[in-house]
Structures are given as C-alpha cells and as structure tokens.
Image (cartoon, helix red, strand yellow):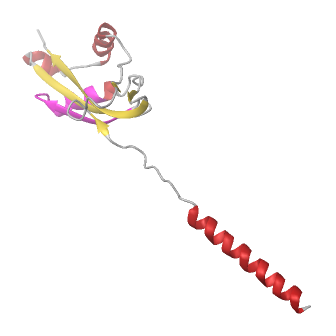
Amino acid sequence: MKRQIILMLSLVFLVTLSQKAKAQNTVKVTTEADTTVYDERTLSGEHVYKIPQFPLSNEDFNHFLHNHYQASNVIQKNRLYTKLAVVMTIEKDGSVSNYEVKGTGTQVMRNEIVSILKLLQKYTPGTRDGQPARFRLSQPFEFKYE
C-alpha cells in the first residue's frame, strides 16, 4: 500500500512538472494592429504601396459635385473665388474618416463640401506590401463663380 501511495505521488509530481515545462516553452505572440496612416511623407522605397483609388472618374465626380453643391446667395452674388483642400484618412476598408478642410472658404462651404464627400461610396482600399493600410489623402477644390 505504501508503494502505491509513493508511486501515485511520484506520478502526480511528474505530471505537474511536465505541465510547468510546457507552459514555459509556450511563447505567446501578439501582433498589434497597424494603425499607421501613410501619406506622401511616410512612403518609403522599401515597401510596395498601392494608393487608395477614388470611386468616380474626374468627370463623374465633377458632375456629382455640381448636382449636390449649393453655394450660398452671398457667394454667388459677390462671385467669390474659393480654393479648398480636404485632407482625409482612407481606412483599411475604404471608408473615409478625419475630414480636415483647409483654405479660404467660409465655414458653411467647408461643412457643405464635407457633407457631399460623405455621400460618396467607399474608396478602393490602399495597401502596403499587399496588406490593407490607412492612407491620408488631400483633395483640392476650386470654386469660381461668374
């Protein structure tokens, strides 16, 4: 009986020891999601980049903009020339976020152009070395009223 108890305790001890050894040999690898936003300043020759593609041709986009943009009466009456640039982030799924409008336009114009851009369909996503990546793009706009 004593032998059996010693044998059982030895087996339990060996099993516990082997479990600890397995746990020490296991390496947990965690990869953080790439949240880098690439633009013309951060692109390097070491990687292959594919810039996100706009969903419409230039002609279709101009037509879309013309149909959706409503300039205020003051802007039309005074024939104000306005130049804006919208800097935006194209996400890994092609959606657009973080709109930032720069230029000479009024706040109403800035809000209007962003609301129009939000109506557009998603971009074709960009990639870095074949993997989806976030990109920052700038879209210039010029408004001339005659």
For the residue pair 45 and 112, the one nearer the viewer reads as: 45
Specify whether 15 is left or right of 62. Answer: right
- Establish if 66 lies above or below 111: above
Residue, far bottom: 2
Q: Quadrant of the N terminus?
A: bottom right
Q: Where's residue 51, x and y in %? A: 33, 24
Q: Quadrant of the C terminus?
A: top left
Residue placed at 23% from the left, 35% from the top?
Answer: 42
In this view of the protein, can residue 90 be seen by the observer? no
Q: Where's residue 46, x and y in %? A: 29, 31
For the residue pair 139 and 41, the one nearer the viewer reads as: 41
Query: In terms of image quadrants, where is residue 8?
Result: bottom right
Residue, far right: 1
For the residue pair 7 and 91, the one nearer the viewer reads as: 7
| Boundaries of the magenta span | 96-114
For the residue pair 109 and 77, the one nearer the viewer reads as: 109
Specify whether 95 is left or right of 104. Answer: right
Q: Is residue 98 magenta?
A: yes
How many numbered marks are there? 0
Query: In terms of image quadrants, where is residue 69?
Result: top left
Q: Is residue 33 magenta?
A: no
Specify whether 117 is left or right of 8. Answer: left
In this view of the protein, can residue 102 be seen by the observer? yes
Q: Where's residue 50, x and y in %? A: 35, 24
Residue placed at 38% from the left, 18% from the top?
Answer: 55
Q: Where's residue 26, x and y in %? A: 57, 60
Residue placed at 33% from the left, 13% from the top?
Answer: 64
Specify whether 6 is left or right of 99. Answer: right
